[in-house]
Image (tube, coloured by chain):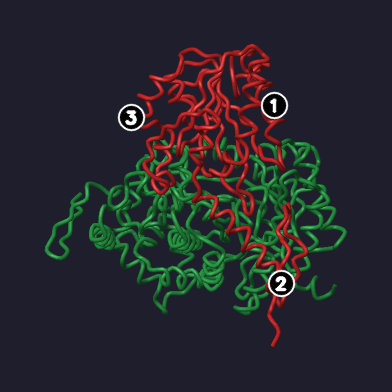
Chain colours: A green, B red
Amino acid sequence: MLLRCKLHGKVFEFRDLRELMGKANDEKSGDRLAGVAASSAIERAAARYVLSEIPLWALRDSPAAPYDADEVTRLIDDAVDPTVYAEIKDWPVGELREWLLRDTTSPEAIRRASAGMTGEMIAGVAKLMSNLDLALASARLRVVTRANTTLGLAGTLGSRLQPNHPTDDPDVIRAEILEGLSFGCGDAVIGINHAIDTVDNVARLLALTQSIIDAEGAPAQNCVLAHVTTQMAALRAGAPMGLMFQSIAGTERANASFGISVGLLDEARGLAQAGSNVAGPNVMYFETGEGSELSAGAHNGWDQLTLEARCYCLARRYSPFMVNSVVGFIGPEYLRDARQIARAGLEDHFCAKLAGVPMGVDVCYTNHARADQNDLESLAILLAAAGCNFFMGVPGGDDPMLSYQSTSFHDTASLRQLLHLRPLPEFEQWMENR
Amino acid sequence: MSDLIIDLPDPTARMTARIGLGRAGARPRTRSQRVFDADHAITQDALAETVPPELLEELGLFSVASAAPDRETYLLRPDLGRRLSDPAMETLRANINLGADVQIFVSDGLSARAVTVNLPELLPALRIALAEQGLRMGPPFFVRLGRVGLLNAVNGIADARVVVILVGERPGLGRADALSAYLGYRPQVDSSDADREVICNIFPGGLPPREAALRITEQIIGILSAGASGVRRGLRS
């Protein structure tokens, strides 16, 4: 394989697709930390130029982890639809970009083509897209799912109510939920990041949230974002559960560092399908975030966007109700500042939608990243315009349990007003009837 | 026109949930937004602070640096914060007595203010509590821009039985004075988080420094009697 081009009189050559994909990325501190980033702006431009001519089959044939050694690769590759793949495999990545953006390409055609794509192809095309490309292409790709509410319809914006508390105080959590509901938050899920990691406590928090949902008659679902094995134990013990949650990563080894495998996720979903109390067919909730593979030392020399796109191809196996990346949470060594966080947020959302995953984003930042509330609000507007399925609703935007800032109840209401978006239909009906 | 006098009380207070903020249309009330602004500002300022050298001197700490040359590099290269600079290794070799029962060191980490606020009470109380237990303590010192993984590097030189780093936590909104203590039994090159124990939220409104000193001492005794720390101690006990 020869990967070479000439730009401004200078010749650039790349060893393999791994090097090319890393150098084609927008500037991110995590890629620099991994040693895979371009060393100059012109080298980055050269990598993108070469990438634009790479046929899709080459990306399938060069997965970020070897087929024989990685179950995520196997799962994704085995799920590729051979008929669809045969139709698209010779397209250069640059042509895929244009096809996605063309007025004559229908969302249905994109959904069909998606079945022939791997994470590497999806990440490849994202690298060639500008921020507005990403927003425009994403906005056409609706992914609609159903639990007790219907998430992802055009013209709607959902909200995860996130009533966290540093000691899981039930009175404070109850007050947070009631205030969130009064702002129209919680239609995607009422989901708690718990502080006390025991089966009993997870069951107690599930019972608490369910009792509020029942008392208010709200069409909503609950979730406690514990490790999947803890939730499984709580569900087996009879706790009322809407959605089953897990953080996932893009390689088998990174998932092992989370204490999960495809087999375990299969089992969790089976249990949730049998035991969840939601009406619709979608019962899983996943979180992702660029950089988790490098953080686990399981990135195999690949860039964080490619690994992230693989997460979405893993997620689609489980037809989740909702997925989001926690885009600014990981810290400045992976995403240094507001500009990198914004870019990653738009990329993650696009990649997930192209993979066919019902994507929201936790638009957020930690205090040691170079970002502030204005940056967060700007990215939320961009993503809402791009058709993002949901955002977090954190009281006052300050999560004292996880020590980071995210979108607030107020932000959800504001974005709906600004962009003429509605709450999820069942939930809006309930609000109107109150 | 009379003189305009504005003299406002301090509206910031520790909150565990920012509820009841009110609204102006869909946006927060002005006062709520100003409190958020102030809380964010105090956190940002804390990130830029350094520990005053006079304080370290008063507490009898000598000072060295991690391999991170400046704060920006420290943020972007976590690996450098886990290593000692070459001069630091020389200084430690010259100043540390090998084989102490307990080697304590301090680092600003992500919050110098956590050190400035808590150390003047915490360190003397720790010295007393450890002495009462008859434990030999190596000379404590300060490492600028360190991370928890320094436990391994420090013990490569100190060869102590238990090593403790007192390090500034990542600041939360409006709260930048929380310190954590990470403890390890004979940390080695490849020791990981699973081998460590932590006592966090040490600050006057959380776990007060004097109480923390007793808690840390108890934990050291537990580790010494188990001959292990972290998951290994959990499995044995």
Residue B215: which numbered mark, if any? 1
Number of residues whose C-alpha sits closer than 10 Å to that of mark 3, classed few (under 14), some (14–19) or many (20 or more): few
Q: CA distance from mark 1 to mark 2?
A: 42 Å
SS for callout 2: loop
Q: Name the residue nearer the viewer: B102 or A69.
A: B102
- Mark yes or no: residue A235 visible: no
Name the N-terminal-most of marks 2 and 3.
2
Q: Is residue B146 above or below residue A157?
A: above
Number of residues whose C-alpha sits closer than 10 Å to that of mark 2, classed few (under 14), some (14–19) or many (20 or more): few
SS for callout 3: helix
Tell me what residue is drawn at x 33 percent, y 29 percent.
B86
Q: Is residue B159 above or below residue B77?
A: above
Q: CA distance from mark 2 to mark 3?
A: 53 Å
* Amino acid identity at mark 2: Arg
Tell me what residue is drawn at x 37 percent, y 66 percent.
A129
Where residue B214 appears, as percent x and y from the top left, is: 70, 25
Name the N-terminal-most of marks 1 and 2.
2
Where residue A94 appears, as percent x and y from the top left, is: 31, 66
Residue B29: which numbered mark, if any? 2
